[in-house]
Each structure stands twice: as structure tokens, then as C-alpha cells.
Amino acid sequence: MAGMSGRWESGFERALWGTRLMVLVAVVISVLLALGALALATVEAAHVLALVLRDLAAPGADSLHTRIITGLVRAVDGYLLTAILLIFAFGLYELFISRIHIAESSEVAPRLLLIRSLDDLKDRLAKVVVLILVITFFQEALQLRYDSPRDLLYLALGTLFVGGALYLSSRHPPGEH
């Protein structure tokens, strides 16, 4: 009877270990979403470029400058979202499936693929998400109207909080360089 339970246990463990391959769905979907985000950001950048070229021909409109800067911020935001999705896909693949062997000969890989635990992946993603939030704050600040000193105070407080978030996200835990 002991042999039967050992085979059952071994088969169950093999099946359980195989469930990690479900993560491939998230990896593939993340890469496809990254392609979509890249396409949207590129369309936004092309639209901004067209506005810039049109603005060179007829300078002067402040609202056009605001639209250009807002479009630039949206394009950068889209490219950062693309980066988040790729980092997420790479991290999940390396953590659950296998090392990306072709990346081992790449000079870029050590900077990009230093994901050895879920905490590493979470930290990488959190830093990029903070950057996206900063860019979104900047975009919103450009579109607001500042009609009173209180509005400027809120902008200053928001900027202080953004600076604090950037400072805290760039700090390393003690003992880490």
C-alpha cells in the first residue's frame, strides 16, 4: 500500500508542478497588451508630431501648446505602460517557467532581467507605476486652471507629494546598493 501512495503522491506533485505553466497565458496576454500599448502610444506620438509641425507653421496658440504637451505626456505614458507589461511578462516567465536563455548573451539582459523573486518583480513594477503616476499628475496639472492662491497651494502640495513618492521609490533597503 505504501508504493501506491508514493505513486499517487508523485503523480499529484507532477500535476501540481505542471500548473505553473498556466502562467504562460498571462505572459502571452501581457506581450499582446504591450504591443497594443506600443501601437497606441506611437499613434499618439505621431498625432503630437503633426500638431508640432502645424504649430511651426502658425505659432502662438497657448491651447495648442497645452495639447501638444499633453499629447507628449500621453505618448510617454503609453511607452512606460508598454515597458511595465514587458517587465511583467519577462518576470513571470523567468519566475514560473524558465530562464530566458537567449537573453544571457545580451548586454541589456542584466539591467532588465534581474528578477529572481516575486518581490523583485513587484519592486520593478512599483517603480514604473510610480513614474506613470508622476507623469499623469504632470498631465493633469497642465490642464487645470489656477484661479486662486489655494489652487497654487494644492499644486505645490501635490508636487511635494510627488517628490516624496519619487524619493521613497528610489531608496534602497539597508545593506542593498
Image: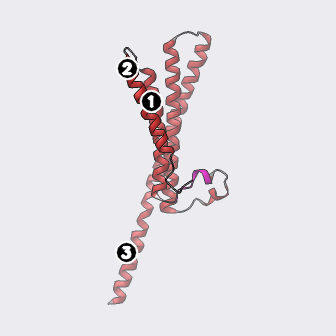
Q: In the rendered structure, which amino acid carries the disc numbered 2? A: Asp
Residue 89, placed above or below residue 42: below
Image quarter (top left, top right, bottom left or bottom right) of the N terminus: bottom left
Question: Which numbered disc covers residue 159?
Answer: 1
Name the residue: 52% across, 39% down.
80
Magenta span includes 114? yes
Element assignment for label 2: helix
Name the residue: 49% across, 30% down.
74
- In the rendered image, which residue does mark 2 sit on? 151
User: What are the residue bounds of the magenta stretch?
Assistant: 110-116
Q: Report the Cα–Cα distance between label 1 and label 3.
A: 54 Å
Q: Which residue lies furthest to the left in this view?
A: 1
Residue 7, placed above or below residue 94: below
Question: Which numbered disc covers residue 88?
Answer: none
Element assignment for label 1: helix
Q: Report the Cα–Cα distance between label 1 and label 2.
A: 12 Å
Tag in front: 1 or 3: 1
Q: In the rendered structure, which amino acid carries the disc numbered 3? A: Phe
Name the spot of residue 28 as percent of width and height, x first.
Answer: 48, 51
Q: Report the Cα–Cα distance between label 3 and label 2.
A: 62 Å
Question: Which numbered disc covers residue 12?
Answer: 3
Name the residue: 38% across, 25% down.
154
Residue 42, by quadrant, is: top right
Q: Do the residues labelled 1 and 3 touch (CB within 8 Å)?
A: no
Name the spot of residue 123 as percent of width and height, x first.
Answer: 47, 50
Please state which of residues 52 and 118 is positioned toward the viewer in this rendering. Answer: 118
Q: Residues within 10 Å of mark 1 (few under 14, many from 20)?
A: some
Q: Residues within 10 Å of mark 3 (few under 14, many from 20)?
A: few
